[in-house]
Amino acid sequence: MPATLSAPSRPSERSAGSDFAPLARRVRGSGLLDRRRGYYAWVIGLNLAATAAVWAAVAWAGDSWWTVLLGIPLAVLSARAAFLGHDAGHRQIARSARANRWLGLLLGNLLLGMGHGWWNDKHNRHHANPNHVGKDPDVGEGVLAWTSEQAEGKRGVLRWVARHQAALFFPLLTLEGVNLKLGSLLFLRGRSRRDQVLEGGLLLVHAVGYLGLAFALLPVGQALALVALQHAVFGVHLGAVFAPNHKGMAMPEPGERWGHLRRQVLTSRNVRGGLATDWLMGGLNYQIEHHLFPGVPRCSLRRLRPLVREHCAAVGLPYAETGLVESYRLALGHMREVGEPVR
């Protein structure tokens, strides 16, 4: 597997645990952890205005089947809102935890119909133990297999999916938009009454407003097609952003304990690119920097990258970075290799 790191290239546990402190001090002194509220106010306002403009275009275009294609820009703008909700979850936007939570609820539950509480719970567990089977929900048991053991344990249709999962990956992502909403609802079953009322109420307002708008502006057939297209493209877009970040990277063995620097760098992969890549991937192309310093505002990650690269080189830690196409080749290659035992 091309992205797998051999044991000799990894620093010792003692080194891995202590080598993060100098980098953390340097980053704190650089000002890169400072909030960028003006930037986020501009980005949130622009995204809301663009979303309103696309819905206005739906109303103007009327009941033509061509109007359905406006589901594509709606999906792209929804992904932008998801990235902003992600940033709020990491407290990148506002100073207080309360303000960030409310931003997450408004961007996630109300605007997207995706539960902020569910996402935060799942995503924080991922950040704590990336690519660690049994601890990271992103490599847990599900439709897809992330280890050969998971693939061999599947039966029936899921075993067939594991056998062909590299080819099925992007088609399956068309269902991810719906899956995110279902996961948000199921998560509320075990929550407090207050969370159920608040988060569930906002999800309900979203569903009524979103579907009401679609069916008020379009005939039933076109409205259903626009909703389906938006959710399909939204799922593929998000999946295409998250897939290159960790798939095919190092996976800690059960019982292994890595220091923060080693745990985050060895399990993550950056994607090279310019400002267009930064925009399309919501800054998550700087996955190593984001995992090391999740509180750094998205717009500061590009400036953080050279500091992290320099530090990794100084301590002898491999720093994985590829182009976008190569990142997909590595991720899909890992999925193909995992499915090999059941082919």
Image (cartoon, grey):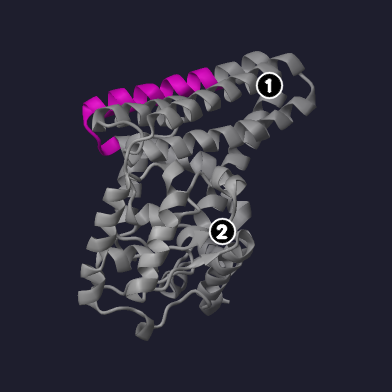
Determine if residue 226 is in view: yes
Please give the residue where the numbered disc 1 appears in the rendered image.
Answer: 220
| Spot occupied by residue 127 in the image (x, y as percentages of width and height) | 33, 54
Q: Compare residues 134 and 161 and report the one nearer the observer.
A: 134
User: Looking at the image, which residue sits at the far bottom?
Assistant: 8
Inspect the magenta stretch and tell me whether residue 156 lies in it. Answer: no
Which quarter shows the C terminus?
bottom right
Query: As drawn, is 325 to the left or to the right of 61?
Result: left
| Spot occupied by residue 129 in the image (x, y as percentages of width and height) | 30, 60
- Which circle marks residue 36 in the picture? none
Bounds of the magenta span? 189-210
> In whole angstroms, how far apart are the C-alphas of marks 1 and 2?
43 Å
| Spot occupied by residue 251 in the image (x, y as percentages of width and height) | 38, 70
Q: Secondary structure at mark 1?
A: helix
Could you tell me which residue is drawn at 26 percent across and 72 percent down? Answer: 16
Could you tell me which residue is drawn at 29 percent across and 27 percent down? Answer: 99
User: Up-down: is 65 above or below 290?
Assistant: above
Query: As drawn, is 242 to the left or to the right of 115?
Result: right
User: Up-down: is 309 above or below 234?
Assistant: below
Q: Compare residues 264 and 274 and report the one nearer the observer.
A: 274
Could you tell me which residue is drawn at 31 percent across and 75 percent down? Answer: 253
Task: Bin the neighbour count of mark 2 within 10 Å (Cα to Cα): few under 14, some 14-19, many 20 and up.
Answer: some
Q: Compare residues 175 and 7 and report the one nearer the observer.
A: 7
